[in-house]
Structure formats: structure tokens, C-alpha cells
Image (cartoon, rainbow, N blue to C red):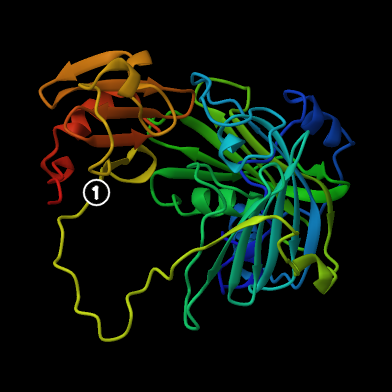
Amino acid sequence: MSIFTTRPALRWLVPAAVAATVIGGGAAVRTLTADASPSLPPRTAAQLLVDLQTARLDGLSGTVVQTADLGIPALPVPGGQGSSDLTSLASGSHLLRVWYAGPDSARIALVGTLGESDLIRVGRDVWTWSSATNTASHRTLPADSREKPPLDPSTLPHTPQEAADAALAAIDPTTKVTTGSSARVAGRAAYELVLQPRDTRSLIGQVRIAIDAQQHVPLRVQVYPAKSDKTAVEVAFQQVSFARPNPAQFRFAPPPGATVTEEPDAAPPAGTAPQKATPPQFALVGKGWTSVLVARLPADTTTPSTTPDQRRGPGFALDKLPTVNGSWGTGHLLTGRLFSALLTDDGRVLVGAVSPDTLYHAASDPAAALKASK
């Protein structure tokens, strides 16, 4: 759930994300949660789901650790473990601080070794700030906007709540929902909700959500690959307070000498003629845990057929990935512990928590034949 939503505060639950990590490769979270399990009155999985959906949150602040071990090649993005660059959240370990005082007052700070990056929402103003580059960008949301700006460009959830929402959205006949042992996270007693795909084709084995016994909001989310007892993604509070933060936490003014970019409003001016409709640029093949997202890369994105120095995809060099082919065509394959991604030479990208064979089958599906926009 995004911190920019106007839905109940629960769905808002502070930013950190299937970005919560174990500083130093995993030991941190284990240390934080090593306390004896608390004794709590029993609650069923159905009761815990109701708790999640009905919780209300007036204020929150805390520190989150995130660990992502997706089993993919190191991505050549700025920083790395300990980086304050938001694009680094896709792998390694990171520390984030969060503040929340309502849908219109929220702040996330990714704290790195040598700097900090912030995302701040106050009223209709949205600021991003990087201390490392001394740059800031500003955007004013429309008065009636329900837009939920992303926390970072990665595809991972960015807070325990967001991770929980993504998992809960998959609850249908394809999911087994049970309860786990009680836990203690950030010094607070918590129930545990366990989600397991019934379809064995999914690369996800289970998602475990630790829910605060009093506030009913997620304190920790762990995602396990199929046939593995080692987490691939973990997001957890290290410290949390449910007191309403001081309004000063949400005030921001670019420091002297900062480079400030004013982002344009995405909405067209009143009276502007609508643009000609373009073919859909994304599709979903399959459903539930084994669904495959298909999208068309921007027209200016280079393809694997260009020179090696130009073969750049979204975050990695395509020429470093294995070449694959089938009835759907040719392309390059990226595999990890939780997902597979196929980048085809005709400009499509297919991603899912499935094996490569499932991606190849989806690539041949008529629903995945996205037409290039002109």
C-alpha cells in the first residue's frame, strides 16, 4: 500500500518495503527477532485478514531494514549495498526511516553510508531529494488526484504494508492461507499469517506476514522461494512508534545550491483534444501466482540486435544474459530465486514468479502479442 493513498491508514503503513533488510547480509533481522515468542490469544487466519483490512493508523514513525537476495546478477545501478540511491533497493541490504501522519503527510528516507535520499508527500506537494547529488525534484498533484507515486523504480514492494497488500491480492482458490507461530518484531508481539500458492509452478513457496497484535498492521514480511527455507526478500521494522510525528518532519525546502527540477503535471490542460488511442502496451497472461505480466518496452529502447556497447536493457546489459528462442521468437532470459524475465527481440518483456518454460508458453499466447505503437 502506498503512502500516497487516501485509503485507511492501514493500507498506508510506512515505507520501507520488500525493501526491509538485514544490514550486513541477514544477521540484523535475525537478531532483531530473536526474542522469545510472545503468548497471544489464538486468532484464525480469517480474523487476521479482517484485522488487516480494518486497521486504522493515525501516526507512525520507525526504522526499517530490508534484504533482497533474488539470485540475479549484480545490477549496474548506482551504489549497491549501503547506497542511498533509490534504485539500489532491488538487491542487497538497506536501512530506511519512515514517518506517517495521514494520507497527505508522509516521508521515507533511504539512509546510506555517505548520504540520504528522501521521498516526501505534504499536501499536494511531492518532493524527492538526494543529498549525494544535492538535487531535488518537485511535483504538485492535482486537487482531486488519487495518484499513488511510486517509492522507487524497482518492481519490489517498498513497505511491510505494500508487501502484505500484494500477497493478499492473490488470495483466491489458488492460495492456502494459514497461521504461523507468534513472533516478536521491533519489540512488539505479533501474529503470523502464512500464504502458500497451491500451484506448484510458482517460484514462490510462501509469504509470511507478521501482524502487530494491537495495531493490526504488518511489522514484517518474508518471502520464501519454493523448495527453500532461506528468505529471498525480507522487510521488517527494527524500531516503530505509533505516535503521530511532529509536523516538522514533513517540511522540506531545497538547501542553498541545490539543483531543483519542477516536474510537469501529467494531466493534459483543460480543453486539450484527446490524443489518438494507442494499442495496449501491457497484458496479463494467466492468473494468480502463475500469471505473467507482458509489457512493451519504449520505442527508443535498444534491442539485443544492436552493438554490444548499446545492448542495455532495464538495469542490466542484455548481452550478458543467455540467448533463448522458441516458437515465440528469440530473446534474452534473466532468472532469479523468485521470478523469471524474458526480453524478446521484438521489444516485449515478460515477467512472472514462474519458470522460464511458463514464460515461453505465455510469449506464444495471442494475448501477449502486443502491437508496437506508432
Image position of 268 with respect to 249: above or below = below
Against 16, residue 104 (above or below) is below
In the figure, is residue 206 to the left or right of 173? right
Where residue 209 appears, x then y in whole percent?
65, 45
Instruction: Tell me if residue 217 can be seen.
Output: no
Quadrant location, the N terminus: bottom right
Residue most extreme to the front = 257
Residue 146 % position (x, y): 48, 74
- The residue sitting at 69% across, 73% down in the picture is 102
Q: Is residue 95 left or right of residue 362?
A: right
- x and y percentages locating residue 129 in the rendered image: 66, 54
Give the residue at mark 1. Answer: 283
Q: Residue at x 61, y 73 (%)?
A: 8
Left or right of 205 in this view: 242 = right
Residue 199: quadrant of the picture = top left
Instruction: Give the quadrant of residue 203.
Output: top left
